[in-house]
Image: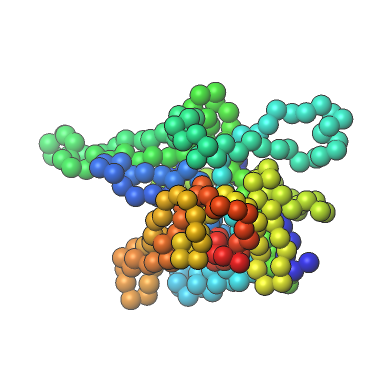
Amino acid sequence: MPWAAYRVVFKLKSPMHIGCGKVGNVQRTRSYVTGRVFWGALTLRLTRDATSGSATDSKQYKTFGDQVNSHLAFTYFYPAIAKPKKSHSEENQNNHPDYEIPFPWDNESQFRRRFLSSYTSTALAYPQQAVDEGLLHEVEFLSPRTLDQGEQVYLVGYVFEKEGCDLQWQDACQRLQMGGERGYGWGDVKCGEVNPLGIGDHHLFGGRAVFIDNEEHALVETTRLLAHTSAAEVSATGEIEPLVGREWKVANQAGQHVEKFADPCWVPGSNVARSQFFKIEKFGIWHSA
């Protein structure tokens, strides 16, 4: 088999902010972890592990980032709650815990009440001992525990490893920090599971999609788009957005280069009229197969 499929589960240990634009003073967050965010966290960890933590050359990050895109494919990661434990006899049939994934588009208002909160802060004008005018801001985040019942929140997704891959990505997953506001300790996760899918089991996200092994690309079959998908190639029902972000370029200072890393895409949760095949390309973005 050219591709080996793994279910990867992270335990969310601190608030997580996945940038989704700004409305007024509020920095909004996405309700899932995009492939590009996972790619960035994995690239950073692989690079620093390979250079004993002293990676200061941007070319080193590019080298490992290209290797991640060449040898791995991955889905987006979605918040999940661990299902109640089964009886001992049932657990023996399946040693891996299962998770309930309340996709945000199924009931957006309920999802926001359960999983999303915000943190408000401002800068101070110390001579006046007052709030610095115009610098009040609010940052949304995915909570590490549900806001209604205090249940632990996990992030569930899938990684597909190409035959011959020698990247130590499973070890790197043990020490990842994802998203924004990391300097404040946000985005801290603990890898609780990296398990291969069982023989003959190609179902992803509880059957919402099916993994198809292919020589060239990792393929999925579904009627619901679970990642950003090229709008130029696929006809769907939903919303479209451009995918841009700030990147480090040698000729620019950090964060000053704005990069378009995909054409306008259907957002996750959009629907296609009938079941279709999609290939997972770099940053976890889907394209028509």
The front one of 26 and 225 is 225
Apparent side of residue 261 relative to residue 43 in the rendered image (left or right): left
Apparent side of residue 200 relative to residue 203 in the rendered image (left or right): right
Snapshot colouring: rainbow
In the rendered view of the protein, which quadrant contains the C terminus?
bottom right
Q: Say if 214 sits above or below 226 in the image.
A: below
Question: Residue pushed farthest top?
Answer: 149
Please provide percent x and percent y for residue 190.
61, 44
Q: Say if 84 sits above or below 101 in the image.
A: above
User: In the image, what residue occupies the spot 39% across and 60% down?
Assistant: 242
Please provide percent x and percent y for residue 150.
54, 26
Residue 283 visible in rendering = no
Question: Residue pushed farthest front?
Answer: 273
Please provide percent x and percent y for residue 8.
66, 50
The front one of 38 and 251 is 38
User: In the image, what residue occupies the spot 53% across and 50% down?
Assistant: 271
Answer with the quarter of the image where residue 23 lies: top left
Residue 142 visible in rendering = yes
The front one of 253 and 210 is 210
Answer with the quarter of the image where residue 113 lies: top left
User: In the image, what residue occupies the spot 44% across and 32% down?
Assistant: 109
Apparent side of residue 76 relative to residue 251 in the rendered image (left or right): right
User: In the image, what residue occupies the spot 52% across and 30% down?
Assistant: 146
In the rendered view of the protein, which quadrant contains the N terminus?
bottom right
How many numbered circles are shown? 0
